[in-house]
Amino acid sequence: MDKIEHRTVVTNGINMHIASTGTGPVILFLHGFPELWYSWRHQLLSLSSVGYRCIAPDLRGYGDTDAPRSVSEYTGLHLAGDLIGLLDSLGIDMVFLVGHDWGAMIAWYFCTFRPDRVKALINTSVPFLPRNPQGNLCSGLELCLETITISS
């Protein structure tokens, strides 16, 4: 992993650790729970070897990135804002966005709030769930758990 560089970028009021390598069009990788940038190490090296600049941050609250204490500082706006600030600080206009698990959820927020900054989106492991202001996530989870219990 000699080619992967690590640095800290100030973005959206936090210090964010990033791992990056390569030059060319930018691919931004967003890790899942409970992962770190390290989950993408093989993709960083492989894709940078064929002409891409690959960046994988530790997301807000993970690894070497700051973890604000208040739960209210982990909204979709905060998480997408972290990434916009990251791109701005690196002078990057648009990215290919790749998300996994929790990172996929953040990627959808990013695309919703700033589609002008995304060339394409690739998400793995999590289906898209559109925002429902009248919905109650806890009730949905309880119903899901009841269904699993009854089926077992």
Image (spheres, rainbow, N blue to C red):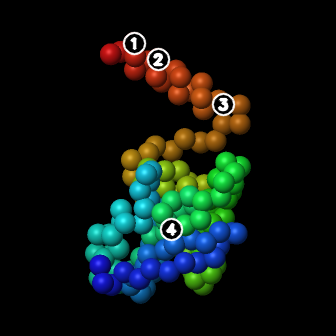
| Disc 1 versus disc 3: nearer the observer | 1
Mark with earlier residue (4, 1) = 4
Q: Residues within 10 Å of mark 2 (few under 14, many from 20)?
A: few
Question: How much space separates mark 1 and mark 2, taking CA atoms?
Answer: 6 Å
Question: How much space separates mark 4 and mark 1, taking CA atoms?
Answer: 42 Å
Question: Which numbered marker is on residue 61?
Answer: none
Question: How much space separates mark 3 and mark 2, taking CA atoms?
Answer: 18 Å
Q: Which residue is mark 3?
A: 135
Q: Amino acid at mark 4?
A: Asp
Mark with earlier residue (2, 4) = 4
Q: Classify mark 1: helix, strand or loop.
A: helix
Q: Is residue 9 visible?
A: yes
User: Quadrant where the N terminus lies?
Assistant: bottom left
Q: Residues within 10 Å of mark 1 (few under 14, many from 20)?
A: few
Q: Amino acid at mark 3?
A: Gly
| Residue 74 x/y as whole percent | 64, 53
Q: Which residue: 49% across, 74% down?
A: 18
Q: Which residue is mark 4?
A: 64
Q: Amino acid at mark 2?
A: Glu
Q: Classify mark 3: helix, strand or loop.
A: loop
Where is 145 relative to 20, above or below?
above
| Residue 125 x/y as whole percent | 39, 47
Dots 1, 2 in contact, CB < 8 A: yes
Q: Which residue is mark 2?
A: 146
Q: Classify mark 4: helix, strand or loop.
A: loop
Question: How much space separates mark 1 and mark 3, taking CA atoms?
Answer: 23 Å
Where is 83 relative to 152, above or below?
below
Mark with earlier residue (4, 3) = 4
